[in-house]
Image (spheres, helix red, strand yellow):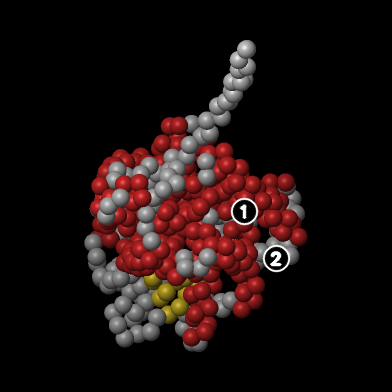
Amino acid sequence: MTETRKPKQRFRRKKSEPVDEDKSPSMSLEQIMGGDPDKIRAEAPPRPRLTYLDAVRGLVIVLMAIDHARDFWTPTQFQPTDFAADGGGWQFFFTRWITHLCAPTFVLLAGMGAWLWKSRGRSKAQLSVFLLTRGCWLIFIEFVVISIWWQLPFGVLWKGFDPNLMYPWSQVNVTQFPPPIYMAQVIWAIGASMILLAGLIWVPIALLAPCAVAVILGHNLLDPHDAQFGFQQLGQPRTFLEKLHGVAHTGFGAISLPSGTSLTTNRTWMNVYPLVPWFAVLALGYSMGPLTKHLGRKRRKTFLLIGLGCIAVFAAVRYTNAYGNPSLWSPQATTLDTAMSFLNVEKYPPSALYLLIMLGIGMILLATIDLLPTTIVWILTVYGRVPFLFYVLHLPLLWLSAAIMVQKRFGDDAEQWALSAHNMPGEPQLWWTYAAWCGLLVALFPVCYAFGRIKQNSKAWWLSYL
């Protein structure tokens, strides 16, 4: 009897899918190994980072340095985005405009980073404590360390802390500390938003995400109620609600602090980055955290579609001039001027349209950054792995280099100058900005590389705060 053979089943191997750098196992580390979780985490090797997130973070911090180099090296009497101003033009406009990308993307990435921090074996309670403590730390650094470099007169370099040297915009001399203006900028915005996020993480992401989007898109409805806190109005009395609104929503809102203590007498709070809508950008980043763990192709498609969608909505709404930005666009004499008018969106406070286009570009970068040459990606990750160190160091370096430059060129005439409170004689030279920027990046690269290696190889808890 002939034996019938069953046909052999042929299995076709699936094509290998790209593996993300931080692919999480289906089982937790504790389940796989057993034992004490804290001991396991302490003994486990450091997990690989998501390189594309570090690269995007590095790119935006490098772009940010262009804008700050311009503040110190090429001060102007006109707003750089005022392309019609005498001495302005497309060079100044786009030098400023490309740096608009930095703050929204950086805050969004901070939110994503919070989700990733929790995903690596921490509980929500641990994340809440971390966000609360790190937020307080960032606010402290903003007002005690960072604010001084925006206000310190260059004359301190060659005259020391002479009582005759005054901080700009005030009658406070340089021997008094802290500086007279508490400048609530992006580090403050991230810190204060982290404190809020410490509570918001307990809200389900399915609810948190749409609420964050609603705040980002809808906060311009508050514009008619904005208190006009200009420097010329500091002496006018303010009610508590007006001050609260100024802190929450008014960009560059300036509020005189009450006298009575050394920290408040003759001091002003300048609200450069209001909490609304910045806390919502951080919350949105946290809500999008799960998307960062997608495999390469899926991640690219997801972020690319979101980014293109944001830009499409921006273009449609901006074209109507109906909502989302305090200044309207209009046709100009040339196509380039018309394009600049269309793209000229408000950063202080960030309008809905500003956030739409900048977050849209940020999403596209998250989808495509690792398509750049490997060397460029590596250089960006060196900066992007230590953004806090870069931020804290780049301002004193820019201040020092600018102080040396103005002292050599103008001598004692420049002793009261500080940042863009002065306007150097002659036509502003934008190439100085880019020269100072390149020098800054070269100087900080080895420092960032060395500190990045320390963070990578150390398990010290306090490094999470740097």
- Say which of 51 and 22 sits in front: 22
**Could you tell me if residue 188 is visible in this image?**
no
Q: Which residue is mark 2?
A: 323
Residue drawn at (73%, 53%), measured in percent from left and top? 332
The x and y percentages for residue 458 are 25, 47
Outermost residue, front direction?
1
- The spot of residue 417 in percent (x, y) is 38, 61
Q: Which x, y percent locates residue 74? A: 46, 51
Residue at the spot of label 1:
357
10 Å neighbourhood of mark 2: few (<14), some, or many (≥20)?
A: some
Q: Amino acid at mark 2?
A: Tyr
Q: Residue at 73% x, 55% y: name it.
A: 316
Q: Residue furthest top?
A: 2
- Disc 1: CA contacts within 10 A as few (<14), some (14-19) or many (>=20): many
Counting from the top left corner in percent of width and height, residue 386 is at 35, 49
In the rendered view, would you say 139 is above or below 261? above
Q: Amino acid at mark 1?
A: Ile
